[in-house]
Each structure stands twice: as C-alpha cells, then as structure tokens.
Amino acid sequence: MLKKDKSVIIKFDFSVEQTVGQITKVTGFMKAKYLIPVIDILDLKANPRSSKTGPVTTSIQESIESDCNLFPFKTKGILLASSQYERLERSRIKIMPDNFEIEGILDGGHNTLAIGLYILKQSMLYAGKPFPKGEKTWDRFKELWHENRSVIDIYLDELRKDSSIGNLSFYVPVELLVPRDAVDFACVEAFKNDLLEICEARNNNVELNISAKANQKGFFDGLKSLMEKRNPALCSRIEWKTNDGGDIKAQDLIALAWIPLALITQVKDETGKIIEPIAANKIYSAKGSCLKQFEKLMASPDVTIKTSADYKRELKNTEVNSAFQIAVELPELYDYIYENFPALYNSADGKYGRITAVKKLNETRKEKKTPFSGNDIDILSPEGYIMPLVYGMQALMVNKTVNGHNEIAWVQPPMTFLQNNLGKIVKYYSGIINICDYDPQKVGKNAQSYEQALAGFKMAIAGIL
C-alpha cells in the first residue's frame, strides 16, 4: 500500500479527457524528464507482467535515439491508473494510488523500463560512471535507479543550463485512468474492480497468459507464502510473476500441487459445476492444463473470497491450504527421487547410462543439478521417468478430519519413507520404462506409469514389496 504522501504529479501536454460510465481517461504526451518521479514512486506490481531488457527495449531505445520526434507516434506509450487524484493547474494531475498492488503502471512496462534505462544511462555516462552490462529485470533496474538517483538530478540540472548535452524533452504517450468521481465510494469501488479486466485487454494487446492472470488475482499468494516460510531460497527462484526473473516456472510447482489437491473434497465453480481434479499424467504432459484448472479451483467461492474492494481474492478453504502445505514439500522430495533414481535403477539390474535418452540429455547439458534445489549431481534424468514416482507419493497422503475440519496430511514422514523404500519401489516401477521402449515421453504421458508407481508406494506402505 502506498502512503498518501507518496503522490506523483502527471504533467500533460496536449491532453484530452474522456469519460464513459465510471471511468475517466486523460490522454496526452509527457516529456521524458517528467517520467522521473513516476519511476521514483510507481512500480509494476499492478502490471500482470514484469519487464526485462531484450529486443523490445533495445528497439524502443533505438527509436528514441534515431528520431525522438517520431517516437511518440511509434509507441503505444504507458497506461497509468489511480483511484485517488487531484486536479492541479497547467494540465497537471496529482495521483495518489490507494493500493499499489492494482494501481500504478498497468501497461507499458517495457516502455517504462526502456525509457528509464535511457535516462539512467545518459546520466551515468555524463557523470563518468560505467553503465553495467547484461540483462536487466525491472527489479534490477530499480536498484540501479535508486543507487544513482543523485546522478540523475545532477544530469537534469546540467540539461537546464545546456540542452546540447542531451535530450530528455522528447514526448511519451501517456494515458491515465481515474474514477469519474473520486469522492463517490461506489464509483471508486467499481473502478478498482474493472482494473484487472483492463489489464487483460491492454497488456501487450494479447490475451494475458494464465499464470500472469492467476498471480495478479492473488491465487498464488497462499502457496507462495508457505513456500517462503519453508524454503525462502527456492521461493525466490520461482517466477511467480511473468518476466520476474525466476528460473523455475510457477506452473512447475502448480503441477506438483495437484498431487495433494486431487484428494480434497470436491468444490464447485461459480455456476455450481463440480471442479474435477487433474488426471495423473497431466502433471507431466499438460502443465498448462494444470494451471488452467488451478485458476478455476482458486476462483471457486468454496475456495477463495473477495476480502477487499479490488479484484484480489484470498484463500479461505483450510483443506486447500493443507494441500498447499504438502505441495511446498514436494520439490525437495522430487529432488531426492531425481538424484537417487539412476543408482537405484542400476541396482535393479538396469543400465541407466546406456539408455539413449539419458545419454543425449547428459551430452547436451554441461551443468548437472537437481531441478529445484540446484544440488550438484552426477547424472541428469528425463522428467518423464521421474514424475510418475513423484505422483506415487500420493499414497502417503490422506484426507482426514481434524477438529471437525478436513485436511490433507502425510500418513508418515515422506523423506524417511523414501530413504527406506525408494529402492524397492524403483525396482517394481522400472519395468514400465522397458514397456515404453525407454522413451521418456511415452513413460511420462502413459497413465499406466502413474498407476504402477502408485501401486509400488502402496505395497511398500503395506510391507509387501
């Protein structure tokens, strides 16, 4: 949340104002130098995607340098939104975002990043400071921006004295969305509720991907909070928000989460239709479907509720929360299976290193680490071999009643169980790899692989392996 004193003045040139329903749109041009306080205060939390440097930002900066007069006509610019604002003299509007999570920069994150980097680079070069090389995410840019903020002020002062040293007066198209009446509570609430739909339609002019939309609605928050408590290092490596820089995709964790989520009591969507769990083999072969079904689950009024005036939702279902508590343990268990599978396969009279898929994978990948924890290992494994065994741990989970509420829980400590039983389970399971001609894709997509692994775990629990 922004404090009320964290306001930004938007100084328009050639502005036009339009009002339809509960929303007023102010459109105009802003000189680049007036974007500096915008970058100081606002962020991309309200934007479903983060931004990072690449061909898009390079192209934007080249447009500025080649012909800055044409630049405002070659870009769609930046879209801002604020539920609180004050009209000032000389075409200025002071905005005071009430909720930084949904207000601020809604679209144009790459434009903001590119222009901000351009300003920062010019300022640092003028001061004789080297500009850091390499790719930059929005977060890294903001660190550099704040570290060199005084340098930017010095550059601005020099520009006022001598404009020949640079140009920060080129125009940037800016749109500002505000409620029609900022003192009308109903008008402001309606405005806030409409912001995500506007983001979806405007962000890059394409359909917002499911992961970005789910994160923006708060559907990842419960899982993220539990992961942060259990394993903060791993949590920081997950790309919860698109383009945020994590090397682990959120959908990889969501796919694993369906292993315990499949055991929850059935819930219904907003139309009253039962939300079906994901089929076992889809946690490998259709992670996009896992994510889409997860979004549907989290949107259910049986699972989340709207607790504030905006579009964010909050987890209320304790049974789902208990499934999340198990889900955040699964990456560590996945890595244990991944690291030990080759040796256990060989112990079951297999020749793991001779499998063509295994040989090719290890020839093309120089770095050999476990997928989640990043531990060094001797040999990499195709995911299709591993995922059925990870799914098999569902045999160690149960839906039980505790103090009148259902929860998903382990029947025994999972890591200890794996340490004592994984070898026997791998020996029972490994035959499916032979049946599938050692093709990891066939193993991972074959429903029988998951049935075989689950049966192996159940027999190990029963002591008959």
Image (spheres, rainbow, N blue to C red):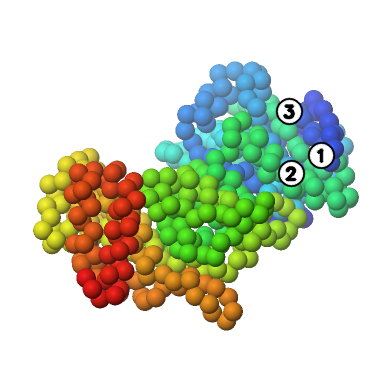
Element on which disc 1 rests: strand
Element on which disc 2 rests: helix
Q: Is residue 148 visible in this depiction of the protein?
A: no
Q: Is residue 207 above or below residue 313?
A: above
Task: Say which label, 2 or 3, has the lower sequence index.
Answer: 3
Q: In the image, 22: left or right of 204?
A: right
Q: Is residue 308 above or below residue 443?
A: below
User: Residue 16 lies in what quarter of the image?
Assistant: top right
Q: Answer yes or no: do the residues labelled 2 and 1 have beta carbons within 8 Å?
A: yes
Disc 2/disc 3 C-alpha distance (Å)? 24 Å
Element on which disc 3 rests: strand
Q: Which amino acid, by three-letter code, is at mark 2? A: Asp
Q: Nearer the viewer, mark 3 or mark 1?
A: 1
Where the N terminus falls, by quadrant?
A: bottom right
Residue shown at 15% from the left, 52% from the top: 352
* Residue that label 3 marks: 29
Query: Would you call the spot at circle 3 few (<14 residues within 10 Å), some (14-19), or many (20 or more)?
Result: some
Q: Which mark is residue 82?
A: none
Q: Residue 378: x percent and y percent?
A: 19, 55
Q: Is residue 135 above or below residue 266?
A: above
* Residue that label 2 marks: 194
User: Residue 198 lies in what quarter of the image?
Assistant: top right
* Residue that label 1 marks: 23
Q: Answer yes or no: do the residues labelled 2 and 3 have beta carbons within 8 Å?
A: no
Residue shown at 39% from the left, 75% from the top: 411
Seen from the viewer's position, the closer of residues 260 and 94 is 260
Disc 3/disc 1 C-alpha distance (Å)? 20 Å
Disc 2/disc 1 C-alpha distance (Å)? 9 Å
User: Residue 119 lies in what quarter of the image?
Assistant: top right
Q: Which amino acid, by three-letter code, is at mark 3? A: Phe
